[in-house]
């Protein structure tokens, strides 16, 4: 799954770079806003359905075909309603964001809704059966289909409608990979009980995801709506910087897939110390990877924006420096959020994210009105920190402290040593040499102070101590 996620990210990032370079900041900003609305709807349904289907199939593998058929029928009803809502709301969305002809753009974007929903449902089936190789392959081919589409279009200049149509092509490619051996064409019976179980399991997770994605997209939407034509270029810089900012935490989705069932099992057995250990180890793993990447991105933010996207995006360096911190808080919230869901607290989590979104809306309006795009980035950072704090409070109430402060202090010290070496050597020699030397220093310090023999022993012993069925 890590390899598949890496391939998905690398190929998908090539798509982002091609689109950003071909469109330019203004047009890419309009495309990014439309995609953020589409992603908000698609990912909300994906987490709700995929999580529910995966849990049900994992518990009762023999009912996988029945669960899939129930999920497909439910998806048809839900996405028919969503498409109608998109069709009716598209003129209002176009006017609110100030994008010419966007009513047509939103309607084209919505075509992908039923196809992506089916793709997500199939992912849930294979996740429940633990077919991780097929999931990894589907992720990689989904991204590859997008890349092939935008490369084919780039020869004649990419328009927004064409870029949006590529999403449908990618979803169809993912469906083709997963449809085989999924039971999609089976004639297994299903009943209303399957639908009720899907709704009962997925509704709280879906509500949390809707609020979470709305909260993350709100600063961009306010920036585009409040800034008029000036906001076209500003939103393009914001979207481009956001795409770079998420790089250090991109593997969090794989960590969540492992953490959720592990915590759920420990909670069902009443093993609170084990839950605390899972949380502590997940946070340590995240900080070990995120801290050095975050510090280096902040240090070379303008250089990275120019190198990845061209000189037209160099003004996005300050945005990147703030947004990479925001992405870190959002990743922490994701780790803690999956843990809360596994412990049965999805309803509390949904309420927490709804309150956070309200605060984000106020902050976005105030800060965008006063300082523009950097204000939107600051609002995103503040809201992400607030959401992470809320999730931590829920877990602390249920499980107590996890003891992550001391490891974080050691990792932070190693990061500062890396930053000093990178800054000094980059000034007297060149930036690349400074980065390489800084990373070497960081690895040496964390190996000496934070990473222990126990960490390596646990990796080796996990497979030997797990029950035979789990290993399989």
Image: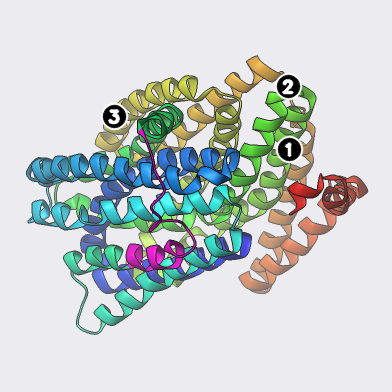
Nearer the N terminus, badge 2 or badge 1?
Answer: 2
Tell me which residue sits at (28%, 81%) in the image.
Answer: 152
Determine if the magenta segment contains residue 174: yes
Q: Is residue 79 above or below residue 167?
A: above
Nearer the N terminus, badge 2 or badge 3?
Answer: 3
Q: Is residue 285 above or below residue 233?
A: above
Q: Contact (CB < 8 A) between labels 2 and 1?
A: no
Q: State the SS at label 3.
A: helix
Quarter-of-image position of residue 186: bottom left
Camera-nearest label, 3 or 1: 1
Nearer the N terminus, badge 3 or badge 1?
Answer: 3
Which stretch appears magenta?
170-191
Residue 16 image point, x, y percent: 37, 66
Residue 255 image point, x, y percent: 63, 47
Residue nearest the observer in this picture, 258 or 220:
258
**Render colour scheme:** rainbow
Real-space CA distance between mark 2 and mark 3, rounded to the nearest whole angstrom: 35 Å
Is the N terminus in the top left, top right, bottom left or bottom right quadrant? bottom right
Report whether residue 253 is seen: no
Which residue in the structure is indicated by mark 1?
Answer: 408
At label 3, counting other C-alpha atoms closer than 10 Å, the crowd grade (few under 14, some 14-19, many 20 or more) is some
Real-space CA distance between mark 3 and mark 1, rounded to the nearest whole angstrom: 33 Å
Q: Is residue 206 above or below residue 302?
A: above
């Amino acid at each position: 799954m890590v390899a598949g996620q890496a391939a998905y990210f690398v190929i998908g990032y090539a798509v982002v770079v091609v689109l950003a370079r071909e469109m330019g900041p203004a047009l890419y900003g309009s495309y990014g806003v439309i995609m953020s609305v589409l992603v908000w709807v698609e990912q909300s349904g994906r987490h709700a359905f995929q999580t529910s289907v995966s849990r049900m199939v994992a518990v009762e593998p023999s009912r996988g075909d029945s669960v899939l058929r129930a999920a497909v029928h439910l998806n048809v009803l839900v996405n028919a309603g969503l498409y109608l809502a998109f069709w009716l709301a598209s003129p209002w969305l176009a006017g609110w964001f100030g994008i010419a002809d966007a009513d047509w753009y939103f309607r084209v974007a919505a075509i992908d809704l039923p196809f992506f929903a089916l793709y997500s449902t199939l992912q849930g089936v294979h996740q429940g059966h633990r077919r991780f190789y097929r999931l990894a392959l589907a992720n990689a081919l989904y991204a590859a289909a997008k890349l092939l589409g935008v490369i084919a279009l780039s020869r004649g200049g990419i328009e927004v409608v064409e870029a949006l149509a590529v999403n449908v092509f990618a979803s169809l490619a993912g469906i083709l990979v997963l449809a085989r051996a999924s039971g999609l064409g089976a004639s297994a019976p299903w009943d209303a009980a399957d639908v009720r179980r899907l709704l009962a399991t997925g509704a709280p997770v879906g509500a949390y995801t809707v609020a979470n994605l709305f909260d993350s997209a709100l600063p961009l939407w306010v920036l585009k709506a409040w800034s008029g034509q000036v906001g076209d270029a500003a939103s393009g810089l914001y979207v481009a910087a956001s795409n770079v900012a998420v790089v250090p935490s991109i593997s969090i989705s794989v960590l969540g897939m492992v953490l959720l069932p592990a915590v759920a099992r420990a909670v069902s057995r009443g093993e609170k110390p084990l839950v605390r250990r899972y949380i502590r180890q997940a946070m340590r793993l995240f900080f070990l990877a995120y801290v050095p990447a975050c510090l280096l991105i902040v240090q070379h933010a303008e250089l990275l924006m120019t190198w990845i996207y061209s000189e037209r995006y160099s003004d996005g360096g300050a945005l990147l420096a703030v947004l990479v911190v925001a992405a870190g808080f959002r990743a922490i919230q994701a780790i803690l959020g999956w843990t809360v869901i596994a412990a049965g607290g999805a309803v509390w989590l949904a309420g927490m994210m709804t309150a956070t979104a309200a605060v984000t809306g106020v902050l976005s309006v105030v800060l965008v009105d006063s300082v523009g795009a950097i204000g939107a980035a600051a609002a995103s950072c503040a809201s992400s920190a607030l959401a992470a704090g809320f999730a931590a409070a829920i877990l602390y109430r249920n499980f107590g402290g996890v003891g992550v402060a001391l490891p974080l202090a050691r990792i932070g010290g190693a990061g500062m040593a890396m930053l000093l070496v990178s800054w000094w050597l980059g000034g007297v020699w060149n930036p690349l040499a400074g980065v390489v030397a800084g990373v070497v220093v960081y690895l040496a310090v964390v190996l000496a102070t934070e990473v222990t023999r126990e960490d390596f022993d646990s990796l080796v012993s996990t497979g030997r101590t797990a029950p035979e069925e789990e290993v399989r």
